[in-house]
Image (spheres, rainbow, N blue to C red):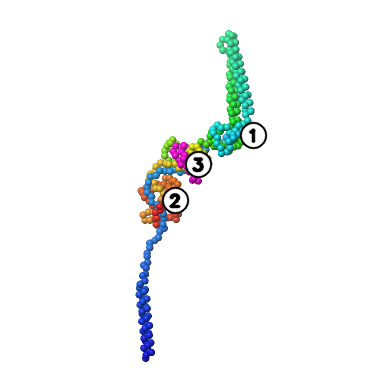
Amino acid sequence: MKLKMLTIAVTLASAASIVAVAAYNGEQMSAVIVPAVETRGPQYPDVAIVEVARRDYRATITGHGEAKPRYELDLTAEVSGQVESLADRFETGLEFEKGDALVRLNQTDYQQAVASAKASVADARLALLEEQRQGQQALKEWKRSGLKGQPDSSLVLREPQLQAAEAKLENAKRELEKAKRDLGKTTIKAPFNALIISREVQPGSYIQAGSKVAMLYSTDRIEISIPLSGNQWGNLPPLNSLGNEQWPVELTSTEGNKQWQGYVERVEQHLDSASRQRSLIVVVEQPLQKANPLYAGTFVEAKVQGRDLSELWQLPASAISQTGEIWLVDDNQSLFSIKAKKQFEDSNYVYVVPPDGTEYARVVIRPLNSYVQGMYVQPVVEG
C-alpha cells in the first residue's frame, strides 16, 4: 500500500514539473515580438538629370582648320647658268627678307650679252643719224628740182628708210633692256619675307631656266580657312562687321596646350566642292614672332564670338543621344523624348531651342539606348 502511494506521489510531482516548465516556456514565447511585414512599391531605375530653364546666351562658333602661309612658292630660276655662290644662311628653317640674294649664277655670258646689246644700240643710233642726214639731203634736192607737188613715191625723200632706222634703234634699245634684265636675273632674290622650306641647288651645279631653286613660305602672316555650316553662319554677326572690324578669334592647337589670337580677315564667296561649305579666313600676324610660334601645318580649333541669342536651354553635351534626341522626365516621373534643335555648342555644353510653351524641364544627362517612351524612373538631380 505504501509503495502504491509513493508511486502516485512521484507521478503527481512529475506532472507538476511538466506543467511548470510549459508555463515558463509559454511566458518566454509571449515576450518575443514578431516584426510586421513591410510592403514596398515598385522600384524604378535612378537617372541623373539637370534642371534647365530658358536663358539668353552669346553664341560661340567653333571650327577647325590648318594654318597655312599667305604665300607658298616654288622659287625657280628665270635664266640658265652655273651656280657661282649661295647666301651663307640659305638653309632650311632660316628666314630672309624681301630682296635678299639667295643664289648667284655665273654672269660672264650675260655681261657679254649686255655689251653686245649696247654696241647694237650704238650702231642703230648711228644708222638713224645717217638716214636722217640723207633724208634732209633728199628733201633739198627735191626742192631744187623745181618739180611741183609731192613726189610719186615716199622713197624719194627716204621716209621708209628713216622709219626703218628708227625701228631698228628702238629694237636695239629693247634688246639692251632684256640683256640687262637677264643679267639681273643671275642673282636670285627672295620675292617676299620668307622662310626656307627646301633648297634644291648647290654651288657649282648648272640649272636651266625654270628649274626649282627653293620652296618658300611667307612669314608676314598665317591664314586659316575655317569651313562653317549654314547654321553656324546664321549665328555670326553681320558679315560686314566680320571683315571690316577685324573680329577677334581665339585659336587653340589640337593638342590643347598652345593658344593664339587672330582675327577674321575675310569671308569666302564660294562653296567648297568637297565639303559644300563656305569658309571664314582667319589671320595671325607675324606668326613666328609670337611667344608660342604658330607654324604652318598646325591644326587648330577656332572659336568666334557670335551674336546674342535668346531663350535657349544650356545642356551638357552628353544629354544629346546618339539619335539626336533629348530625354526628359515629366511630372509623373516617366520618360519622353524630343528631337534636339541645336543652335550652337562649345567645348562643354550644347545650346538647344526648347519646345514651344516649355519654360522649364528636367533633362536626362546621360540617356541610354534602352530607354522607351513612358518608362518610369527615379530622377536624381546632379550638380
Residue 271 — which label? Answer: none
In the image, the segment drawn in magenta is: 246-270
Identified at 58% across, 19% down, the residue is 166
Kindly report which numbered mark, 3 or 1, lies closer to the viewer in this rendering. Answer: 3
Which residue position holds label 2?
318
Q: Main secondary structure of the magenta part?
A: strand
Identity, as a three-letter code, of the amino acid under mark 2: Ser
The mark total stands at 3
C-alpha separation, residue under disc 2 versus residue under disc 3: 33 Å
Position in image of residue 169 (x %, y %): 59, 21
C-alpha separation, residue under disc 2 versus residue under disc 1: 64 Å
Position in image of residue 17 (x %, y %): 37, 81
| Secondary structure beneath label 2 | helix
Q: Residues within 10 Å of mark 3 (few under 14, many from 20)?
A: few
| Res. 154 image quadrant | top right
Please say whether residue 326 is visible from this viewpoint.
yes
Q: Nearer the viewer, residue 352 or 97?
A: 97
Identified at 38% across, 87% down, the residue is 7
In the displayed structure, 373 sits above or below 296; it is below
Which residue position holds label 1?
204
C-alpha separation, residue under disc 3 versus residue under disc 1: 39 Å
Which residue position holds label 3?
292
Q: Residues within 10 Å of mark 2 (few under 14, many from 20)?
A: some
Magenta span has 249? yes
Q: Nearer the viewer, residue 101 or 268?
A: 101
